[in-house]
Amino acid sequence: MLFNSYTSILSLSIARESIITLFDLVLNASSAACLPVINATIVRVYSIFFSKKNKELLDQSINKYIALLDPYISKVTKKFLEVGYYTGISLYYSLLGYGVEINFIIREISPLSEEGDTIGSISTSSVTGANEVVLNEMFPKVCDFAMKIYKIVAKRFRDLNILPFIYTFLAFMWHMSKFPAAIE
C-alpha cells in the first residue's frame, strides 16, 4: 500500500506523512547503514525529491547512484528484470510530482471532473490561476536524473535484463505523446 501511495497521482495525506517518516529515517545516515549502498542512495534521492528536505545532499546522492548503477546491473543480472520496472516506475512518478502538486504534466494529462474545475479531487483554482503552469522546483533535477539513468541503461543495449526498464520508459513516453502540451 505504501508503494501504491508513493506512486499515486493523488496520494493520501496520511500516506504522504508515513512516507516522509520513512524517508526521514533514510536521510539519517545511521539508519541508512542497514541498507545496501545502492538502495540507500536511491531512496535518499527519491526522499529528497519527494520531501524537498536535505537538498544539499541531492547532487552528491545522484552522482553516487549514477556511479553505482552500471556495476549494480552487471552484478545482479536477472534480478534487474524486476528492479528495472521499479526503477522506471519510481522515476516517472517523480517526474509527475508524486501527486503532491498539480504540476504542468499532471495538468495536461488529467481529465477534468464533471464540474470542470477540478482534477481528481484537488481544485485547480485553489492551487493555480486558470492559465498558470506549475513547475515543481525539483523537476529540472528529476529530468536530469532520469536522463542520466536512461543513458547508463541504454548503453547496455545488448543486455536483455534492461528490457523492463526500457519498457517503462517507452510506455511513459508513448502515453506522454498523446498530450503534446505535456511534452513541450
Image (tube, rainbow, N blue to C red):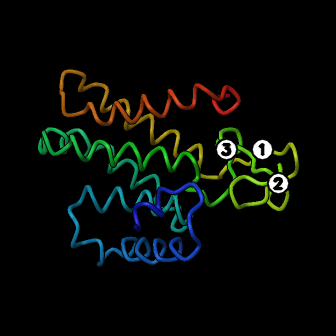
Q: Nearer the viewer, mark 1 or mark 3?
A: 3
Above or below residue 105? Residue 129 is below
- Rendered image: mark on residue 133: 1
Above or below residue 10? Residue 177 is above
Left or right, 145 with respect to 131, comes to left
Residue at image location 26% in from the left, 43% down from the top: 69
Q: Secondary structure at mark 2?
A: loop
Of 113 and 4, nearer the camera is 113
Q: Which residue is mark 2?
A: 128
Tell me the amino acid under the disc marked 2: Thr
Residue at image location 50% in from the left, 27% down from the top: 174
Binning the other alpha carbons within 10 Å of mark 3 as few (below 14), some (14 to 19) or many (20 upward) gives few
Quadrant of residue 149 within the rendered picture: top left
- Distance Cα–Cα, label 1 vs label 2: 8 Å
Q: Nearer the viewer, mark 2 or mark 3?
A: 3
Quadrant (top left/top right/bottom left/bottom right) for the N terminus: bottom left
- Distance Cα–Cα, label 1 vs label 3: 14 Å
x and y percentages locating residue 138 in the rendered image:
59, 51
Q: Which residue is mark 3?
A: 110
Labelled pair 1, 2 in contact (Cβ < 8 Å): yes
Tell me which label, 1 or 3, sits earlier in the chain: 3
Residue at image location 70% in from the left, 38% down from the top: 108
